[in-house]
Image: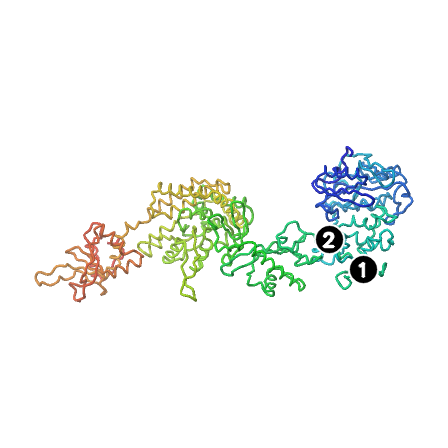
Amino acid sequence: MQAFDLIDYVVPRGGIYNVVGMKEGRPIPKFTDSLEVAYTIADEFSEQGMDVFFALGKLKEKGNRKIENVESLGAMWLDIDCGGNKAEEIEPSTGLPKGYASQAEGAKALKAFCATVDLPEPTIVNSGYGLHVYWAFTEEVPTEQWLPIAKRLEEVCVTQKFCADPNVFDPSRILRVPGTYNQKKDDPKLVKIINPAPARHAPNDIRALLGVDPNAVIVKRSSKPILDVLEKLLDENKDYKFSKIVGRDTPCLQLKDSLINRATLSEPRWFNALSVAKFCEDGSKAIHTISQGHPDYDFHTVERKIVGIKGPHSCEEFEKNNPTGCEGCPHKKNKEIKGPYSLGKVIKRSSSSPINKFEPYFRGKTGGVYKMDGEDPKLVYEHDLYIQKQMWDDEQGFVSVFVFHSPHDGVREFTIPNESLEKRLLLKTLAHNGVIAGTANAALLHDYVTRVIQILQTQKKADIMRLQFGWADNDTKFIVGEREITVDGVYHTPASTVTRAYAPYFEPRGTLEKWSEVFNLYNREGMEVQAFAALSGFGSPLLQLTGQKGAIISLVHKNAGTGKTTVLRMANSVFGDPEQLLGNPKDTAVARVNKLGILNNIVNTVDELSNMDSDHISDFAYEVSQGKGKDKGTQTANANRKNDTTWRNITLSTSNSSFYQKLYGGKSLPDGELMRIIEFYVGYVDPDTISTEEGKRMFDHQLKENYGHAIVPFMQYVLANPESVKNDVLAIQKKIDKELRLTSRERNWSAIVAANIAAGIIATKLGIIKFDMRRIYSKAAEIINQLRKDTIAPLDSYVSILGAFVSSNLNGLLDVDDGVDQRTSKAKVPNLEPRYGKLVMRHEGDTQKLFIPVKELRNELNKDNTDYNSFLEDLKARGIYLDTVNKRMSKGMAIVSPAQRCAMFDAAHPEFIDMTRIVEKAKDDADREGGVPNQLEEV
């Protein structure tokens, strides 16, 4: 080969090169992605005495150089024929001579043409008898943008009466390789570069010279007839092979005869055969196969002859030129066969697709489902449709997961229960999901679905559809909506009937970077409470590492506008849609429990619980912390249903009033509930910290457009480092317990703090967020310390419960000495009697004993969910409770009542209530007919 690398100069790099060897008119195309190999092939062809050509276009794939396979081009070119009778013969399409009398005349005309049009100096190749001329571009030009340049160059040639070959303005053209030989005649001529012009030219400069619109495009995909939009779509999959037409078990008899008798074939019949060969995928070879062997065969003549053929000839045209040639044809009764061309139809296959796994079905190269039926392919469905897998759903049984590539609505996934595979029902369900099958394809489509399911059932066990989000498969995966997060990637897992309602809310949107910008606003000074609460989005999955099942963080402020709800949205945004995942205060208790079970380890948010009373707050606190829904019986049998409603997560809530105050108002000892709630007071945000304008822009707009990404890198780290993460969480909890001197009573508090702080450290370490975790931890510790002071432990409050009982039952108090009157030997007269007749307590001033009926005391303690035995054990240890005795409570009163079981207390005990003052106060009030005090503080 010559030093000047013409192929590299002309053909864009990075595609497929096509080198064609020609021996006695028989083309041998070879394809490679290596320029070095392309030249090696050219050398081999040349050594074998062949004419050698190269394709000027950058090809997308190996196998053909058709227009639709040409991705781009790197030059424009001309072919100038010289010698022989070229100057005398007229080209019908232009009306100009076919060339010039000699190469010298051709070179002279080229120079004049370039000067007139102002084209730059070209690279010129002596092709042996003519001239090949090239102008290389500085950049590759897509085919549809190259075609307007080529079309305009062709027009300019005609206008300027420049005799260039009109057949070379084609992106699939081949020209001779320099350094090889033109074997056209007995005296081979060396193909050589006679004027290398290595300069390249900007495509827009060439466009400007030729007067081509820079935005002009011409889309030329195929020369085959197109019927309509759908047919056009399907046509991109089709191809036609001449070798198939003549190689079938039932070939076209006309073409078979044309091949056998090509040496004596008449020109009309030869044109019939050429018309079919030209439009076949292997046409470049076929047109010469049916031509060589004829005495007048010439390669260039054949190439020129096919230019004017507009389409493949019909059976009728074949029969007109050879009436007996169709006798005995087995395809005559097939109305779909209009001509021999139809017999060569093949469907280009996609190299890889889930459809290809299920023979005889396969995917067309540009889409669609096909089935090989004997020698011919059949269209099953025009778009990609396949069954991804079989799954088991507790509600629906076995279901099939379908994937449908809609032409305009993107890839859609849906499930169909196997019980709905009856043909009519299947087609109806498919239609509901956008898959519309015509009458002709309905049976094929039904057979396709059922056959694939049968194959899938033999390959592997059905996957289990997820009934919950969060940790799964022995803590090796984490489910968020329809995303299955694993160490090595994120996979799709279809929603079950249970999770389907929530799954769409977990679809990510926007970018992680934009989301981080919003979340990091909470790292500013003064936003520590909001930051800690928002970290629940990351901390909730880690709560189970502490052994706790659930707890509540309540954000409180008496007024709206403090950003409490925004914190909940921020926590939600770690996983998905900030707004749609918010719980509603009007949700029923059953709905709340179901949601907890579905979320499982994902943070649960409930907004605006201000109107919830103490009883419902108590129920809510126990629901969250129990981690399991209620067992329910079946309707048809004496048995309980399977209970899969379990969870381990953090619940974030907001309220305008304190849960603690409401709980204290509802019962004397709400310790169980208090220990399940961390209450944070959220103040107004300082405008200097986050301005109103910035808050609206970031929280109301940017957050709504960016969410659901952060959980992926976070959980992939946790999944990859389970032991170290668990150790970190437990170490932080131990540190909290030690520094704040927390006991097992406050284990829920330390678990929440440990989970959130550990999560914040991990997320910051990974660069997901940028938080000052020391400052946030210090604020959380400060709040926990205050909570310890504000909540009374059970061992300190039983005396208060007894005092509250006495205070609230003064109207039923009898105050009387136990002894007898020495003068009358009768029971002493009471100092104070019950005002409204019901006797609840008996106080004896001389013995300093207080008696309360066990029944009354139990009833009162039950209201507070206070354990009766624990209550007495504590007071007995203190010396306040003495014993349980039979006592006639009304002794000294005019009425007579039997003895009853009563708890006896030492009213003289220093930790007990000053009963003397209470009685005196009650007497004064009774004398004045005033009210009875109901608060000990008034005594």
Quadrant assignment for the C terminus? bottom left
The picture places residue 847, in percent across and down from the top left corner, at 15, 55
* Mark 2: amino acid: Asp
Residue for badge 2? 239
Task: Identify the residue at image location x=56%, y=56%.
Answer: 458
Relative to 373, 195 lies left or right:
right
| Residue toward you, 843 or 897 | 897
Judged left or right of residue 368, residue 801 is left
Q: How many marks?
A: 2
- Whole-percent x and y of residue 900? 20, 63
Q: Residue furthest left?
A: 823
For residue 86, side relative to residue 432 (left or right) = right
Location of the N terminus (image quadrant): top right
Instruction: Report, in whole angstroms, how far the alpha carbon at label 1 lies from the one at label 2.
Output: 19 Å
**Residue 675 or residue 209, whichever sits in front:** 675
Q: Amino acid at mark 1?
A: Cys
Residue 797 image position (x, y, % from top left): 28, 51
- Residue 315's mark? 1
179 over 355 or under it: above or below: above
Q: Residues within 10 Å of mark 2 (few under 14, many from 20)?
A: some
Q: Is residue 408 visible?
A: no
Disc 2 is placed on an element classified as strand
Asked which quadrant contains residue 316, the reply is bottom right
Say which of 939 and 235 sits in front: 235
In which image quadrant can residue 773 be found?
top left
**Among the two numbered marks 1 and 2 on one chain, the one whose residue lies closer to the N terminus:** 2
Horizontal and vertical percent position of residue 778: 40, 41
Classed neighbour count for the residue bearing mark 1: other residues with Cα under 10 Å, few (<14), some (14–19), many (≥20): some
Q: Secondary structure at mark 1?
A: helix
